[in-house]
Amino acid sequence: MKKLLHTFLLALAAAGLAFGGQTAAAQENPAEIRLGISAAGVGGKPKIGGSVVANIHLRGLLEEEFTKDGIKIVWYFFPGAGPATNEAFSNHKVDFGFHGDLPLIVGRSTGLKHKILFSTGKGGPIYFVVPAASQAKTLADLKGKTLSVFKGTNGQLFLARLLRAHGLIEKDFRIISQDTYAARTSLSTGDIDGTITSPWSLESRGVAKRLIEIHGDKGADGKYGVNPISSPTTVWVGEEFEQKYPHIVQRLVNVFIKAAAWSSEEENRETQYKLWTQSGSAYVDFKNDWDGYDLKLRHHPLLDEYYIARTKQAVAESLEFGLIRNDVSVDDWLEPKYLNNALKELGLENYWTPLDKDGKPVR
């Protein structure tokens, strides 16, 4: 009898251990992964274009990777852009974020705890656009006029850099804050005198024209090049999530870097343009903004010397323009191990060319 009781107790203990092990294993994964995207489509549509992030969302790649484990992927597309993503993160509503430089820096300067994982692109054109009837020939001709910018977003730094390059400052104009789509509407109705936006569909309707356009090297001869007004975009992870689920962070980064390689292939160029129109933006805007550019540069994920130098420059400019009050250290903000692991695991260590601090290729 004692032997039977002993055997029963051992079996019960073994079952308990097995159940406990299953419970522990279940706790190793989050119930969901929440991504805050600092953009939305036309009319607030929960779809965007023009990035690796868009390609991953529109192709369902994160869902494909994680749904089999019972992990739900939750996408938040914020018409309020970077400031809205920062607010969501501060309220523990998102785990990952997609940011331009200014909101990334503002969040960090105010104490948000996240780690930079990789970039989602560099280069690309910048256009300053005015109403079709505008008589302005230079930015100086618009002094005292109304310009639109989405304050708190990377567009505010773009405009500040552009004005400085022409010997001007924001106080030379009446600056109002509008999101991208509101600004485009105001431009077409003549309610504003200029803004930074893609011009093509506006020009095709005869409601706007380019006053200034700035390009990096389009890569026609295989060279890399950067735009002095634009800056790299970034994907980050909250420190709490990263410390708790490093294996999930690695899997997510692997998905992104694999998608960045797919997005960088010339054979996938047209497919991307067509995917991106699901955001509600016109095909012609994507085609003209991207045609002729080196896709490997536009989708460049490396945290190289250029990324670090440009981020440090953006911090300095944010202080200079009074957009932040506290300095931000960049070097201890980066967490490149997940990117490096992904590049190695996917055989992509030499796929993208690192850039030096001036945007020149490091051979």
Image (cartoon, rainbow, N blue to C red):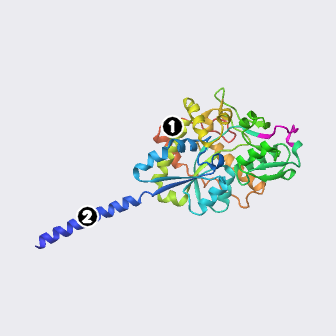
Along the horizontal axis of the image, is 21 left or right of 80?
A: left
Is 136 part of what is drawn in magenta? yes
Name the one closer to the observer, 108 or 52: 52
The amino acid beneath tag 2 is Ala
Residue at mark 2 to residue at mark 1: CA–CA distance = 45 Å
Q: Residues within 10 Å of mark 1 (few under 14, many from 20)?
A: some
The answer to which quarter of the image holds residue 238 is bottom right
Tags 2 and 1 touching, CB below 8 Å? no
At a point 48% along the width and 41% down the height, the residue shown is 344
The answer to which quarter of the image holds residue 85 is bottom right
Residue 248 % position (x, y): 46, 52
Q: Residues within 10 Å of mark 2 (few under 14, many from 20)?
A: few
Is 33 part of what is drawn in magenta? no
Q: Circle 2 is placed at which residue position? A: 15
The amino acid beneath tag 1 is Leu
Q: Is residue 55 visible?
A: yes
**Of the two numbered discs 2 and 1 in the rendering, the one whose residue sits closer to the viewer:** 2
Q: Which residues are magenta?
A: 128-139
Q: Compared with residue 90, is residue 56 higher up or lower down, i.e. above or below?
A: above
Name the one closer to the observer, 220 or 173: 173
Name the one closer to the observer, 262 or 250: 262
Q: Seen from this angle, which residue lies furthest bottom? A: 2
Q: Compared with residue 158, is residue 11 higher up or lower down, i.e. above or below?
A: below
Along the horizontal axis of the image, is 75 left or right of 106?
A: left
Residue 88 % position (x, y): 60, 59
Q: Circle 1 is placed at which residue position? A: 348
At a point 18% along the width and 68% down the height, the residue shown is 8
Q: Compared with residue 306, is residue 102 higher up or lower down, i.e. above or below?
A: below
